[in-house]
Image (cartoon, grey):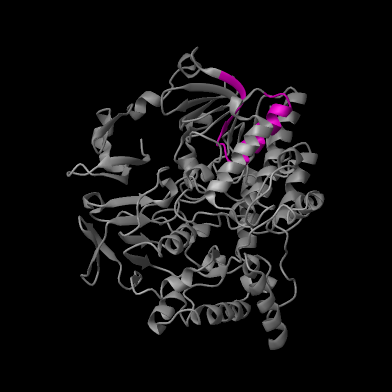
Amino acid sequence: MSVRRIAPYRDQSSEARMGVIDSTKHEKDIRAGELEVGIVKLKSTPHNLHSYHTKQARMGSTALEYDALIVGAGFGGCHVLKTLRDKGFKTLAVDDGDDLGGVWHFNRYPGARVDSKVPLYEFSNKEVWSDWNWTVKYPGWAEIQDYFQHVEEKLHLKKDIRFKTRISAAQFDDSVDKWHITAHDGSEFIARYFILCIGSFAKPYIPDFKGIDTFAGVYCHTSHWPRNGIEYAGKRVGVVGNASSGLQTIQEIAPDVKHLTVFQRSPTYALPMRQAKLTEKDQDKSTYEAIFGKRRTMFAGIDQEFNWDSCVKATDEERQVFFEGLWEKGGLLFWLANYQDVIIDKEANAYAYTFWRSKVIQRIKDPKVAEILAPEIPPFFFGTKRATLEQRYYEVYNQENVDLINARVNPIKEIVPSGVITEDGTLHELDLLVLATGYDAVTGGFTAIDIKGLKGKSLKEKWSKGSHTAYGMATAGFPNMFFPYGPQAPTTFCNGPTCAEIQGDWIASALEFMREKKLTRIDAQEEAEAAWREHVNMIGNMTLIPQTQSEYMGTNVPGKPKEMLNYLGGLPRYVEQIEAVRDSGYSGFDLK
């Protein structure tokens, strides 16, 4: 049993704080059947008791049976639930949280907000959008949660969702072609189809910092910020990491903290968000169907496309005018609507980076700080890590109470009760330590569940040297299991709701096909997934992305295989291929 627990606990002085316990460090406690998390002891069943040696045990009479069981109640889970339910499938969704939203149920750290503008970042269901209006172009976490309550008012999903339910294990029974699924509380479910809508950021990554358990203050990963918040005003705060959640936290709390210390290993190539308030008049519903139709035809599932001209061949004047236009519009356009060769050609990439840097350094007063935030020599190619959106991020570093630590040359050595000690021996005294250290992205949430397919082979074992999928939605040897927004699909290079609807509809069509043909098993072929993996890697290797250590390649997590985790052929090409599979009667799959 190896899970990462994020739970409240107390230190020796009995002051409550938020922390992380990695159960791999407490194997003896787990084997004994008890895991201590601070002053709270959680009962834990030994791993071998979750092995089902007989069909009778696997198919116990207490288990609830469904046509399909969905894990996750975010955009993907909600869409698949609604679609399958409408098609007459007896369906249940379960979620670790206590309400709708998926990642947006837990994403409530200071400043958390979307980086895709609305109405692109919402369901295309007219019943939902017809009487919903946003207040800003890029909504924050609270408004996203309000939106999901509106979704519930319209679609009535909660009656078929079980909350506070974390799936810990699943095993396929080939004698009846059904999945036996177990939750952390011992609840059991039986389902013909097992659909994992857990998203790409289901498992946070926390580096193994020496001494973190000794810290006397509060520490928390941004992915599990407590609902009632953490007091940071007037505190000495440290933030480790400066990608999306780190950047948003930093710019949000900076005006109120006593002192802020940012530990940065690599700069983030942040782009101007250009946030704006929205009125009802701004949200012309007569345009929505066209907007939602268009986003399905765009490379990243938004409303803009790459410029298919060459950056290298453009004149200096043409290039400058084009760059300035993207910059002024803001959002992700300088990344996802730039010249197509920026992501594949080093010379083109250098033009984009130089322009980006010229915009950033003029906002930073201290040249030494500017060199850390926007180095003259780029530490990695522009666009090969996810671009972030900022509103006042770079001005934060002009505050006298803000320190920026270049953790690449002066890394964190250890954490002590009073704060963080860096390699140069400096003690940075802190009251609050924010871990914005990212995720075991795309695959981590799947392999965290003990999933066993045919012949008892585990998914974690199968993907230990790299993920193998058929079209980014299924994997051989795990029949009747599907996973939208997973590895080798557009995923993190696609607008979430767009991808959720396209893949969810494809999965629902597959289940409907199986029912019509009176079939009970659909399993990806190894040949199909080998060909798909080769195709994914071929396209990925045409870009500069494999040359950067990032979540896109899995290299941010020690020991994780380096591989192309996302399909980079663009959404239209992806849709064309999965529709061809569907229209052929599901070529690439064995049907029974």
Query: In the image as oriented, which residue stretches furthest toward the top?
Result: 61
Q: Quarter holding the N terminus?
A: top left
Q: How many marks?
A: 0
Horizontal and vertical percent position of residue 529 = 62, 46
Q: Quadrant of residue 566?
A: bottom right
Horizontal and vertical percent position of residue 228 = 40, 43
Is residue 92 at least partly visible in the picture? no
235, 554: nearer the viewer: 235
255, 239: nearer the viewer: 255
- Left or right: residue 406 versus residue 560 is left
Does the segment drawn in magenta span residue 398?
no
- Left or right: residue 87 versus residue 411 is right
- Left or right: residue 226 versus residue 577 is left
Does the segment drawn in magenta span residue 84?
yes
Horizontal and vertical percent position of residue 458 = 47, 36
- Left or right: residue 64 versus residue 250 is right
Segment colored magenta? 65-89
418, 582: nearer the viewer: 418
Q: Residue, x 53% and y 79% (percent of image)?
A: 357
Position of 465 relative to 341 (above/below): above
Query: In the image as oriented, which residue stretches furthest toward the bottom?
Result: 316
Is residue 148 at least partly visible in the picture? yes
Q: Quadrant of residue 116?
A: bottom right
141, 480: nearer the viewer: 141
Horizontal and vertical percent position of residue 354 = 56, 81
Position of 278 relative to 106 (above/below): below
Q: Residue, x 47% and y 48% (percent of image)?
A: 108
Q: Quarter holding the C terminus?
A: top right
Q: Residue, x 60% and y 25% (percent of image)?
A: 159
